[in-house]
Image (cartoon, rainbow, N blue to C red):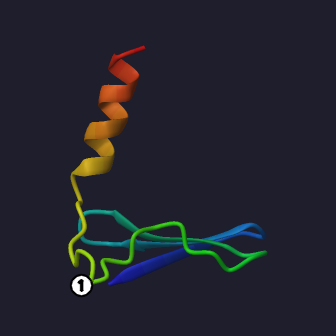
């Protein structure tokens, strides 16, 4: 199941299982800013990457 949040600038989709951010679209230009998981390139996503990268960046300051 997916929850959608939006305001006048962005539309964001979040998978309820694990609270995985799966889509960020800027409304004025329609550009998707999240990896879609295209199987022709690499069909996987990482649920764990963002919190770890964010934590490492904060700890390195």
Dot 1: element? loop
Q: Is residue 28 above or below residue 18?
A: below
Residue 40 drawn at (x, y percent): 26, 85
The residue closer to the viewer here, 46 or 1, is 46
Residue 30 drawn at (x, y percent): 68, 80
Side of 13 relative to 7 (left or right) = left
Query: Quadrant of the rendered structure where residue 58 is?
Result: top left
The residue closer to the viewer here, 29 or 17, is 29
- Mark 1 neighbour density, 10 Å: few (under 14) some (14–19) many (20 or more): few
Q: Residue at x 74, y 76 (%)?
A: 29
Residue for badge 1: 39
Tally of marks: 1
Q: Is residue 21 above or below residue 58?
A: below
Side of 19 relative to 44 (left or right) = right
Q: Residue at x 42, y 14 (%)?
A: 61
Query: Quadrant of the rendered structure where residue 54 is?
Result: top left
Residue 19 drawn at (x, y percent): 32, 63
Is the N terminus in the top left, top right, bottom left or bottom right quadrant? bottom left
């Amino acid at each position: 199941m997916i929850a959608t949040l939006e305001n006048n600038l962005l539309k964001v989709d979040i998978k309820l299982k694990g609270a995985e951010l799966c889509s960020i679209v800027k409304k004025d230009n329609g550009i998707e800013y999240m990896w879609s998981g295209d199987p022709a390139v690499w069909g996987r996503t990482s649920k764990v990457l963002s919190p770890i990268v964010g934590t490492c960046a904060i700890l390195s300051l």
